[in-house]
Image (tube, grey):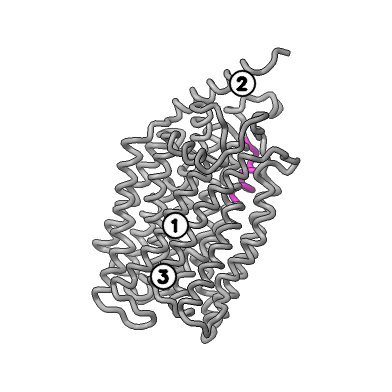
Amino acid sequence: MSEVNQDPVKLTLPLREKFAYGMGDVGSNLLLCVGTLYLLKFYTDVLGIPAAWGGLIFLISRFFTAFTDIGTGLILDSRRNIGPKGKFRPFILYASMPVALLVVANFIGVGMSLDVLAKTVIATLIFMAFGLFFSMMNCSYGAMVPAMTKNPQERAQLAAWRQGGATIGLLLCTVGFVPILSLFEGQTQVGYLVAAAIFAFAGMLCMWWCYSGVKERYVELPKPGAPKPGLLQSFKAITGNKPLFVLCVANLCTLAGFNIKLAIQIYYTQYVLNDITLLSYMGFFSMGCILLGVLLVPTVVKRFGKKNVYLGGLSLWILGDAMNYLWGNTSTLFVLFSCLAFFGTAFVNSLNWALVSDTVEYGEWKTGVRSEGTVYTGFTFFRKVSQGLAGFFPGVMLAYIGYVPNVQQAASTLEGLRQLIFIYPCGLAVLTALTMGLFYHLTEKNYLKIVDELETRKRKMSPAV
């Protein structure tokens, strides 16, 4: 049966298309995680920017890009003239090159002889420019799922492929960056620049692979005469879509916890465990556990449902962090308990994308307006706010606990690092579990009823043949 005549909720995507979609998040994370993992340390240890100021750079830049995400959503939902490339794919193609160039620019360290304020301003402006183009590229990539399929199981699989791609991208950054950096002993700034350039180029190629391998099947144009959406309408659409709003709050917590953990782990391995090379090994094993979890997502979702699997993943995350704080004082135990926590995050991070796609149909059912861009970028707005807070918080807390670069840390500072990497993320995971467990009610059964009702509405509105 051709795709045109097949029931949208039963359409199965070809494997090559799922693989190409997953490559998009390999590229996205190669471009993003270099900054998430290493930029704060580059600011503090190479540029000489105080940790609190480095955190301020992340806060300002992420809050700026939270609004550029919303702007991207408005652009997507306002498009009238959609060519053969599709509604979303052109942004993936054309924005990826400036993103890659700006990744490298973040690590150039221009103005090394300038004072701290000037260096902070320049670094902030470069990171803001990076965030602007990254919004255009990545929001289009994520918002594209409802245009690819309406099958909830296929969406869960796309979410798994996406999280698998994200995990590979994060794994490559975690395992590969430091060894490249170590090749330039005595030339640390050059090492950062070379490593960033390698990952940026690879990330751009992966985004182009995604662009060429996916297909938009359900692109719906705005109704004739319909006003273009505005910023106020976008926020009303978010707050009026209860499942989306709950997901936004939950994601605000989980992403903040995850990013705090990623930002602090390089400090933790260097100063608490006295083995910075452990970061590569820990990344290899823990990211391997995430990949295992991602592979299991479609199977366990089919059996237990998205919400139950999401809550189960949070439980494993909480358990892993709690055990690490209590007993993870050796390299072996740290890696072991981290693997458990990261295995749990695989289910949480994978299902975030599948769940937010379902809220597109919920919003259409509730309001009569289909807004993939607004829904997705509303979700990413909260993610960027979370990333901003997650970037700001470690910088401020590093200053608060008395961190001094490149020296032996005080006992109170070491305890502060342990709390930052374990206690705070664990607490945020607990808060997320309570939020999702009590307030999220868009189950698979309810979703299928909504899609069926939407299709019935469209058939009634279509002229008889």
Q: Residue at x 42, y 30 (%)?
A: 443
Residue 266: numbered disc: 3
The majority secondary structure of the magenta stretch comes to helix
Helix, strand or loop at mark 3? helix
Q: Amino acid at mark 2?
A: Lys
Task: Give the mark, 2 or 1, whose residue is nearer the N terminus.
Answer: 1
**Which residue is label 2 attached to?**
458
Give the class, few, some or many, for how many residues have Cα within 10 Å of label 2's Cα (few <14, many ≥20): few
Q: Write down the region rendered in magenta.
A: 13-23
Q: Would residue 160 be visible to someone looking at this image?
A: no
Q: Amino acid at mark 1?
A: Gln
Residue at mark 1 to residue at mark 3: CA–CA distance = 18 Å
Helix, strand or loop at mark 1? helix
Helix, strand or loop at mark 2? helix
Q: Amino acid at mark 3?
A: Ile
Task: Give the mark, 1 or 3, whose residue is nearer the N terminus.
Answer: 3
Q: Residue at x 60, y 47 (%)?
A: 140
Q: Is residue 131 left or right of residue 421?
A: right
Q: Is residue 300 above or below residue 97?
A: above
Name the foreground residue: 187 vs 245: 245
**Which residue is label 1 attached to?**
387
Q: Would residue 280 be visible to someone looking at this image?
A: yes
Q: Is residue 84 left or right of residue 322?
A: right
Tally of numbered discs: 3
Give the class, few, some or many, for how many residues have Cα within 10 Å of label 1's Cα (few <14, many ≥20): many
